[in-house]
Amino acid sequence: MKKIKRREFINKACPKIAMALIGFSFLEACSKDSDDLMLDESIKLEENAGYTVNGKIIEIDLLHPTFSNINSEGWMNFTAQKILLVKTGSSYSAFNNSCPHQGVRSKWTYNSSERTFLCGQHNNSYPTDCESQGTNGGPLQCYTISKLGNTLTVTKP
Ligand code: FES
């Protein structure tokens, strides 16, 4: 076996290894078709669930069965996007579904007469006015929301 000095090995082998690694990554990164395919597939999946996500913007199809509870119950915990949605009359509100107390996301109920959410984890309640403190912890974090036709657009900060 022929001995080779460390520096000589690095000088000969590294450029080839680097080109192999960078070149392969470069080719993958430049493969626009595969990137587009992955993006299209993710959007399609969300459309089948009645919503699309584009960065911090979530568009919701109110006619989709996924969101039927907003009309029938007046609210829903949209867990897939970590959003509480409320309908009051003809207007809608959206909040981060992280409880201001300890961050639990799945124990919510809504009291429409008091317009408060109750987190069943420790039974603290939180007004939906985007300002008032809850019984333990700060206010619920409000998201910007708008409605056009049957589409709600929620924008996270
Ligand atoms: S985590 Fe919600 S009340 Fe404690």
Image: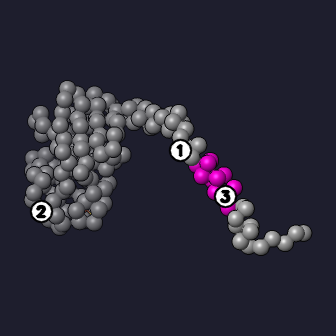
Please give the name of the residue rendered at 59% of the width and 43% of the height, measured from the top-left corner.
27
Residue 154 in view (yes/no): yes
Residues at marks 3 and 2 touching, judged by CB atoms closer than 8 Å? no
Instruction: Give the structural element (helix, strand or loop) at label 1.
Output: helix
2 sits to left or right of 80: right
Q: According to the image, label 1 marks what residue?
A: 29
Where residue 8 appears, as percent x and y from the top left, is 74, 68
Please give the name of the residue rendered at 22% of the width and 62% of the height, measured from the top-left corner.
100
Quarter of the view holding residue 107:
bottom left
Point out the image quarter for the N terminus: bottom right
**Magenta extent:** 14-25
User: Closer to the camera: disc 3 or disc 2?
Assistant: 3
Where residue 71 appears, as percent x and y from the top left, is 21, 34
Crowd rating for badge 3 (residues with CA inside 10 Å; few <14, some 14–19, many 20+) = few
Q: Give yes or no for residue 23 being in the magenta stretch.
A: yes
Label 2 beta carbon less than 8 Å to ligand 1? no
Where residue 152 appears, as percent x and y from the top left, is 23, 35
Instruction: Give the structural element (helix, strand or loop) at label 2.
Output: loop
Q: Mark 3 belongs to which amino acid?
A: Pro
Q: Mark 2 belongs to which amino acid?
A: Gln
Residue 120 in view (yes/no): no
Residues at marks 2 and 1 touching, judged by CB atoms closer than 8 Å? no
**Going from the N terminus, do you reach mark 2 or mark 1 first?**
1
95 or 117: nearer the viewer: 95
Magenta span: predominant SS is: helix
Q: According to the image, label 2 marks what residue?
A: 133
Q: Mark 1 belongs to which amino acid?
A: Ala
42 or 29: nearer the viewer: 29
Q: According to the image, label 3 marks what residue?
A: 15
Report, in whole angstroms, how far the alpha carbon at label 3 lies from the one at label 1.
20 Å
